[in-house]
Amino acid sequence: MKGQTYFQTKQQLIDLLCELVSVPSITGSSAEGEMAKFIHRKFLQLPYFRKHPSYAQLHDTEDGRFIVTAFVKGQKTNKTVILVNHHDVVGVEGYGIWKDAAFNPIELTKRFYGQRELVPFEVRQDLDRGEWLFGRGIMDMKSGMVTQMSLIERASNGEFEGNLLFLSVPDEEVSSIGMRSAVPVLLDLAKQHSFQYSLVLNGEPMFSRYPGDTRDYLYVGSIGKVLPGFFCYGKESHVGEPFAGLNANLLVSELTRALELNTDYCEVIEGEVSPPPTILSQGDLKKEYSTQTPNRALSLYNFLVMKKPMDKFVSSLLESAQQAAREVEKHYNNRAFHYGMMQSSTPRSVNVHVFTYEKLYKYAVDTYGKEHVDSLIKKVQHETSSLDHREQTTAILNELALLCKELSPMIILFFAPPYYPAVCTDDHPLVKKLVQILTKTGVEKYGIVFHKQLYFGGISDLSYVGLDHALETFLPLVHNMPLWKKGYDIPFSDLEQFKVPVFNLGPRGRDAHQWTERLDVNYSFGPLMDLLQMTIKECFK
C-alpha cells in the first residue's frame, strides 16, 4: 500500500487497539457515547474521509448513544459488504486488585507477566506460547473493530472493487438498541447510494464451546435468545394458617424445578446442541417483613434457540407450566390432606390456572374496560421509567394481576426484552464458498484448522439480519411481551427487507467477560487480516 498508513502495520493495529480499549465504554455509561465519537474522529483522519466527510456519520439512537457508519465506494460494482462490530463492553468489577489497569492493556499485560503466580494455569500456558494482550473489551470486541477499521483504510486506497461499509453499534451487551436502530439506517443508505448488500461480516471473536476448547471457528449464523418468565399469583395467608392460602414461592419454585437445565428444550442440528435453559432471576414481590405469606412471585429464564419457531416454543412453555401447576396442586392437596388427618379438619384443595399475558390482558379489558386498563399500564410505565426493561415488565404484570386477582391462583406466561432471533445462512451459495475457501487456505497457508459452526454461541447483532421464520410466527412473542411498542420493539418489517447472508470471522482470544480476557495478537493482526481481505474480495467476484 502506497503512502502513509494509519491502521495497517502490526504496531499500528496494537496502538489503535490500546487507544480504543482505553475508552471505558461500559454499556450504559457516558463513555459508550464518547466511544462512538472517538471512532468517528479516527476515520476523519484518513484522507478519503477528509475528502468525503459525509461518508462517515454518527447516527443518534435517541438515548445519548450513537451508531457509527463509514463507507468507501468501489469503482467496479455496487456489491457491498457490511462490516459490523459493537463498541460497548461489560464492567470491570471482577478485576479485583487489577481493576485500575483494566482499560490499560500494556500495563495490565505487564503486571500479569510479572505476577504469573497469581493468574490461572491455562493463562500462564498462553503467556509461555505467544504474544497476548489483556484488558476489558480487548477480545470482545475492540480487536474485531480494529481489523475492520484497517479494512476500511485499505478500501479507501483502492484495495477492493466493491463498496465496504463499516458499522459500529452500542448496547450489544444488554439490549442491542444499536443494531435494532441500525437496520433502517442500512436500508436508507442502500437506497441513497444504490448499495447491493452481499454479506454482513461480523468481527466477533472466536468463543470456546466448552472449558479448555482451543479450536478455531468460522460462524455462519448466530444463536437466538428468548427471555420467558412466569408471574405467579397464589393466595396470602397468616403463617400460622398456611393452608388458608397458597405461597407464590411454591409455584415459582416448581416452575424452576421443571425448567432449570431441562434438556427437552435443547435443539440438536448437525451435531450442534443448544444449551439447556437456566434461571436468571427468581423471587417473591413482598417488599417488607411480616407474618403474611407471599402471594406474588416471578421468575425469568434464559433460553437459547436455533430452529424452533416461536409459536411452537410458546406451546412447549405452556405445557411445562401446566405440568408445574398440576404438581403444585398434587403437593398442596396431599399435604393438606395429611394435616387434616392430624387435627381432624376438612382440607381445602387448590386449582392453579395457567394463562398467557395476552389472555390476562384480554380478560382485564373485557372485565374493566380498555380505557381503564391502558391508563393503568401507562401510569405504571411513567412511575417506572427509570427502571430497566425487566423491572418495568414486572411492574406492569403486578398491577394487571392485582386488578384481576379473582383469577388466582394463577401462573402467567410472559416475555421480557431483549429478544434475539436465531439466524443461519449455511445454505447460501456465497457462505458455502467462503467456508470452503477459508478452510482450505487456513490449513494450507497457515496450518490452522477451522471448524464451521452453524450458530455463534455468544449471541450477536447478526440476529437482526433477516428473518429465518415467517413474520406471523413471531406474533406469540409480540402479544405476550408487556413492553412491546412501549419502550421496546424490533423492526420486523425492516428485517424482512434486510435479507442478507451473514458470516463471522474474528480474532482469536480467551475468556470474554472475565478478568483474564485476552487477545492472541499474532493471529489476530497476522493471518486473520489476510483471511478477511480474501473474504471480502471473494464477495465482489
Image (spheres, grey):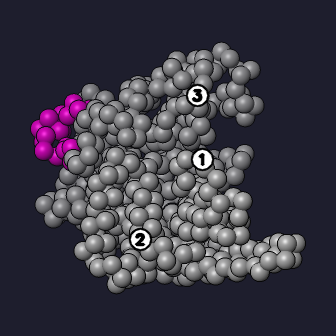
Q: In which quarter of the image is the C terminus?
A: bottom left
Judge whether 65 appears above or below 192 on screen: above
Residue at 69%, 31% (x, y): give it: 123
Question: Among all residues in the image, which is located at the extreme front?
Answer: 344
Near mark 3 (Cα within 10 A), the count class, few <14, some 14-19 or many ≥20, is some
Helix, strand, or loop for circle 1? loop
Task: Looking at the image, tell me whether mark 2 or mark 1 is earlier in sequence order.
Answer: 1
State the CA–CA distance, disc 3 to disc 2: 46 Å
In which quarter of the view is residue 496 placed?
Answer: bottom left
Q: In which quarter of the image is residue 419?
A: bottom left
Amino acid found under the numbered disc labelled 1 = Tyr
Residue shown at 80%/77% (left/top)?
345
**Mark nearer the viewer, 3 or 2:** 2
Q: Name the residue under label 1.
A: 289
User: Where are the magenta residues, as a range?
Assistant: 41-59
Q: Position of residue 72 (x, y in %)?
A: 22, 48
Q: In which quarter of the image is the N terminus?
A: top left
- State yes or no: residue 492 in magenta: no
- Asked if residue 273 can be seen in this view, the reply is no
Question: In the rendered view, does 159 fall on the left or right side of 118?
Answer: left
Q: In the image, what residue occupies the spot 67% across and 46% down?
A: 214
Q: Nearer the viewer, residue 344 or 357?
A: 344
Instruction: Indicate left or right for 461 with 304 as reference.
Output: left
Residue placed at 53% from the left, 49% from the top? 287
- The residue labelled by disc 3 is 95
Amino acid on which disc 3 is placed: Tyr
Q: What element carries label 2?
A: helix
Q: Which of 69 and 344 is in front in this view?
A: 344
The tag earlier along the polypeptide, 3 or 2, is 3
Residue at mark 2: 403
Q: What element carries label 3?
A: helix
